[in-house]
Image (cartoon, grey):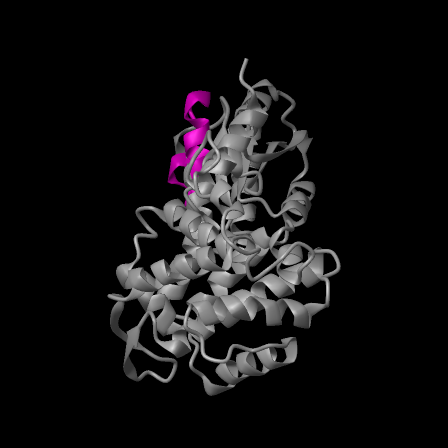
Amino acid sequence: MRNLVREWQAELKQTFTGTRDAVPAWVPRLAEGDDPGYHRPGSAVWAVHGDMPTIVAGIRALLMQALHPGALAGVHDHSRFREDPLGRLAGTIRWIFTVSYGSTGAARAASDWVLRVHGPVRGDYVDGHGVSRSYAANDPELLRWVHIAFTDAFLSAHKIWGRTIPGGPDAYVREWAHAGELMGVESPPLSEEAMRRQLDHWYDAGELRSDERVAETVAFIRNPPLHPALKPGYRVLFAAVEGEHHVVGLRMAASLALHAGFDVRMLGPDLPLPALLAAIGRHEPRVVGLSATMPGSAARLVEAVETIDAAAPDVGMLVGGAAVDRRFELLPGVTVCRHVTDLVGQVEALVQRAGSN
């Protein structure tokens, strides 16, 4: 019998560490070294980096860092994030853990390695004022932006969802300044107020910009190439239109999507259109699956599809059932499911399409 929890744990471990089964070799080495490191048990860094809000913080940090066209150009032109995004993520996490929990020697070695890798990363970009400029990944000001965006993201997420920080927010900013210095940041901020002032400077100077590359980055982050077991946040609604009471196939479809790892809501049979629209507004799904098997249900299914497309154009729609004829293949934004064996792949494709809109 499949152990879904173990499968989920293995995929989660693969995503964050690069290995499914064993503890990564670098983890036990964090306990080695001649000193306790820059950050000790009970520190602000241990409190922030050891809590669940780090998952949200990491996404915020990536989005913030992408707003600087110089920082994003380096990733866009030189990184393999498209081919191996999870490998890049695992490498970043290794650096964070090493600086947070390793010895000072390990922290310096890990940071020096990153700086060496970034050494050849150079090129040109267009800044927020439309001026062409050169960049280098190890430029102190670019490093400052990356450091402050990271610090702000992790502190902000923890202040919303985390527990009390020993010494308060200023302690975290001050302690994590060591990481900035290791990466070549000159005089990183030592208090939350100082960090906010520097962020405001970037905002006010107009150096940040949102363009096609940022949109591409956002679309990629919204739909990372994760295993389906790690996609519970991708919600799918299943319902039968008003007047339709046959839901055996619909329940089978919902069960398959749930087993594939999606966050499934089964709304049931005979659902009036206003109730369906209300459920879409409440649950904010990526995909809605609708069923119609009786001949009289086809017209109501067409009405439902057209109404959803007008009210929620970013939602993917999947339709199936004996009443679904060829006209549904001509409706924009609609995928017709002819067999349940195709369902999971079709849902995944719709999730990707919805996330890129």
Above or below 181: residue 50: above
Q: Which residue is at a point 52% across and 56% down the rendered structure image?
A: 59
Q: Position of residue 141 (x, y in %)?
A: 41, 78
**Residue 344 drawn in magenta:** yes
Q: Nearer the viewer, residue 339 or 245?
A: 339
Q: Nearer the viewer, residue 83 or 179?
A: 179
Above or below 269: residue 104: below
User: What residue occupies the far top of the structure in this picture?
Assistant: 1
Magenta region: 329-348
User: What residue occupies the far front of the structure in this picture?
Assistant: 34
Q: Which residue is at a point 43% across and 50% down the rendered structure image?
A: 89
Q: Which residue is at a point 73% across and 62% down the rendered structure image?
A: 166
Above or below 276: residue 137: below
Q: Is residue 299 visible?
A: no
Q: Position of residue 196 (x, y in %)?
A: 60, 78
Question: Quarter holding the C terminus?
Answer: bottom left
**Residue 316 drawn in magenta:** no
Q: Which residue is at a point 64% across and 65% down the rendered structure image?
A: 156
Q: Position of residue 45 (x, y in %)?
A: 62, 60
Q: Nearer the viewer, residue 137 or 128?
A: 137
Which quarter of the picture shows residue 335?
top left
Q: Nearer the viewer, residue 285 or 83?
A: 83
User: How many marks overall?
Assistant: 0
User: What residue occupies the far right of the structure in this picture?
Assistant: 164
Question: Quarter holding the N terminus?
Answer: top right
Which quarter of the picture shows residue 219?
bottom left
Which quarter of the picture shows residue 341?
top left
